[in-house]
Amino acid sequence: MTKTPIDLHAALAGFDQLWSPRIVTRVNDYDVRIAKVAGEHVWHVHDDTDEFFLVIEGELSIALRDGESGDGQPERVVELPQGSVFVVPRGVEHRPRSAHGASILLFEPTGTLSVGDRHDEIPGHVDATIGHALS
């Protein structure tokens, strides 16, 4: 943990990699991570933890396979404009995406893999990581 405030915009300006979260700080046993995103992530599931998203800049969509589409479709999409938060419940298969790019903040237990416990094949633009330190 840091003993001084962290400017999230300055922290985000310090790296360019997409889908490659940086650990800003820790709260108890949770990482506070930031990431730049664009395009699609990978369908994945966190079996034992919820995943918290806050959109700092841009817009993020999260496709969910949670059986709650209401129209008989296998998935639904949650749209998150700038400033919005959403929690994907543990065990729900999901795929974040951003058509025009976004900066996001996530809360996840320390050591949680960015592609979950189960996932589709990982494309080259997605970093399978437990988070990188801010440089």
Image (cartoon, grey):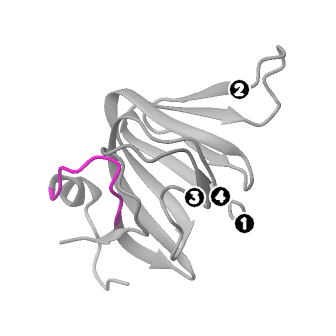
Residue under label 2, please give it. 75
Which quarter of the figure has residue 79?
Answer: top right
First to last magenta residue range: 14-22
Marks 4 and 3, the one that precedes in the sequence: 4
SS at badge 4: loop
Q: Residue at x 78, y 23 (%)?
A: 69
Q: Residue at x 38, y 68 (%)?
A: 131
Q: Residue at x 67, y 44 (%)?
A: 93
Where does residue 85 sit, x and y in percent of width and height? 56, 44
Which quarter of the figure has residue 23?
Answer: bottom left
Q: CA distance from mark 4 to mark 1?
A: 6 Å
Q: CA distance from mark 3 to mark 1?
A: 10 Å
How would you rate the neighbour count of disc 1 (Cα within 10 Å): few for under 14, some for 14-19, many for 20 or more? few
Q: CA distance from mark 4 to mark 3?
A: 5 Å
Q: Which mark is residue 46?
A: 4
Q: Quadrant of the C terminus?
A: bottom left
Which residue type does callout 3 highlight? Answer: Gly
Where does residue 123 sit, x and y in percent of width and height? 38, 43
Which residue type does callout 1 highlight? Answer: Asp
Residue under label 3, please give it. 116
Q: Are marks 1 and 2 in contact (CB under 8 Å)?
A: no
Where does residue 82 sit, x and y in percent of width and height? 42, 34
The answer to whether residue 98 is above or below residue 25 is above
Q: Are marks 4 and 1 in contact (CB under 8 Å)?
A: yes
Residue under label 1, please give it. 48
How would you rate the neighbour count of disc 2 (Cα within 10 Å): few for under 14, some for 14-19, many for 20 or more? some
SS at badge 2: loop
